[in-house]
Every structure is written in C-alpha cells, then in structure tokens.
Amino acid sequence: MRRAVCPGSYDPVTNGHLDIIERASGLFDEVVVAVLINKSKKSLFSVEERLEMLREVTAPWPNVRIDAWHGLLVEYCKANDIGAIVKGLRAVSDFDYELQMAQMNQQLSGVETMFMSTNPLYSFLASSLVKEVATYGGDVSNLLPPKIEQRLRERIAENG
C-alpha cells in the first residue's frame, strides 16, 4: 500500500490545504493528514478541535485518515509505514526551506518528499493570514470551508 502524510498545523484548515489533500488522495492508497502538536506555539484551536474539523472536511475522501503527531515527522512515518511526505508549495520562498527539510528527512530515514504546486487561487493563503484578516472583520469566506469559517468566527468572538 502506498501511504503518504500531509503534515501541518491546520490552525485552521484552509481551502489551500484541502486542495493539496484532495490531490494527494488521488495519488496514494492512503493519505494521513497529521496535525503537528507544538506546545510552544499558541494555537487558536486545540489539537482535538483541529482533528475534528479535519475529519469533517475530508470526509468526501475515504482514503484520507486524520492523526496527530509530536516529534520528528520521519519517526512518525517509520512507525506508520509511510514512505512519502506531501507538501504544498505556494512560492519560491517556501521551496528554499522545504528543500532543506526534504533532504534532511530523506537522509535520516529514506522517506521521500513530494512537492505539489499550490493552485494559483490559494498561492497567498496561510492559516495565520486568514486568522488575522478574520480577526479584523475581513471576508475570508472564499478561503475556508463554510463550517470552518463559522467556527473561526465563533472562536474570534469568544476571544473578544
């Protein structure tokens, strides 16, 4: 079975993330969307909330599984028999960092990284930017699935 992982913070999941996940699901037998657990990073949504939201929006793809991980991604790959990491690239600046990471991961474990160019509609899209725009009342409805946008607006209102 050909397995791949799409790692990220997904705080929150955007249409750009879903574009990469959907495309990866067509190339691999199983795609694991792995939410990074980083306790030193302040997240808007808890890991459990992000897992729940991802399960909801990836439901149309039966070969997509949602999980969380902490530590080295290559160790997660080894433990779960995953041979490829799928990463979306928005711009050349992403490539510089991601290439180093891919080479390190390959050296450490033999796990390959596959880069997918982001749909041009989402080339500027980052979860942090979406949160900032939404915090100031900007329209992010075309950047997120409707249920995720609703949860984002509710969370921003809670944090007042």
Image (cartoon, rainbow, N blue to C red):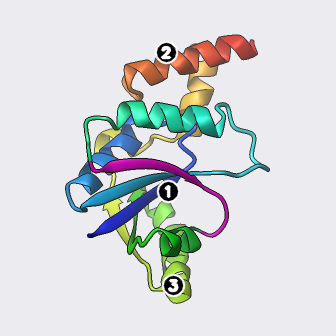
Mark 2–mark 1 CB contact (< 8 Å):
no
Name the secondary structure under disc 2: helix
Tell me the amino acid under the disc marked 1.
Pro
Tell me the amino acid under the disc marked 2.
Gln
What residue is pinned by disc 2? 150
The residue located at (53%, 31%) in the rendering is: 130
Which of the two labelled residues, at mark 2 and mark 1, occupies the earlier sequence position? Answer: 1
Question: Split into 4 quadrants, where in the image is the N terminus?
Answer: bottom left
Q: Which mark is residue 7?
A: 1
Residue 50: name its quadrant: top right
Question: Split into 4 quadrants, where in the image is the C terminus?
Answer: top right
Q: Percent x, y for residue 17?
A: 40, 44
Circle 3: is it few (<14), some (14-19), or many (20+) Cα within 10 Å?
few
Q: Is residue 121 magenta?
A: no
Circle 2: is it few (<14), some (14-19), or many (20+) Cα within 10 Å?
few
Q: Is residue 119 among the parts visible in the rendering?
A: no
Q: Is residue 86 above or below residue 20?
A: below
Which of the two labelled residues, at mark 2 and mark 3, occupies the earlier sequence position? Answer: 3
Q: Is residue 71 magenta?
A: yes
CA gap, disc 2 and disc 3: 40 Å
Residue 82: name its quadrant: bottom left
Tell me the amino acid under the disc marked 3.
Ser
**In the image, is 125 to the left or to the right of 158?**
left
The residue located at (67%, 65%) in the rendering is: 71
Q: Percent x, y for residue 28?
A: 25, 62
The residue located at (52%, 88%) in the rendering is: 107
Residue 124: name its quadrant: top left
Farthest residue to the right: give it. Answer: 40
What residue is pinned by disc 3? 109
